[in-house]
Amino acid sequence: RDLPSFPTRRSSDLDTRLKGNIDACRDLIQAIHDDRQPECDAHQGLIAVEMIHAVFESHRVGGRVEIPLKTRVNALSLF
């Protein structure tokens, strides 16, 4: 069976920012089709999100933070 295709458009700033997400979605769909694990699984995604939140928290507190973060509140909501 054919996999769904994503529309192709000329490159723009928005397309460039979304490329990683589009590639991840394509890989997830292909992984389901091929009955395999995706390149970035949920655990890896969780680690990536934790690191991004750590950057914001570090900026908020003005220094280093430990991972896993002690605060589970979105640092952006505390500014």
Image: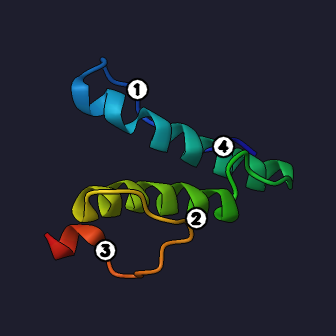
Question: The disc labelled 1 sits on which kind of residue?
Answer: Thr
Asked where in the image residue 59 lies, by quadrant, the reply is: bottom left
CA distance for labels 4 and 3: 28 Å
Name the residue at the front extreme: 63
Badge 4 is on which residue?
Answer: 27
**N-term-proximal mark, 3 vs 2:** 2
* Amino acid type of the residue tagged 2 in the rendering: Leu
Task: Say left or right for 74 vs 37.
Answer: left
Marks 4, 3: nearer the viewer: 3
**10 Å neighbourhood of mark 4: few (<14), some, or many (≥20)?**
some
Q: Can you say whether 26 is above or below 8 in the image? A: below
Q: Earlier in the sequence, mark 1 or mark 2?
A: 1
Mark 3 secondary-structure assignment: loop
Q: Where residue 32 sits in the image (x, y, percent)? A: 75, 56
Q: Residue at x 86, y 55 (%)?
A: 35
Measure the alpha-carbon separation of dots 3 and 1. Answer: 34 Å
Q: Residue at x 41, y 57 (%)?
A: 64
Residue for badge 1 = 8
Q: Residue at x 39, y 62 (%)?
A: 53
Disc 1 versus disc 2: nearer the observer: 2
**With respect to residue 41, does 12 lie above or below?**
above
Q: Which residue is mark 2?
A: 46
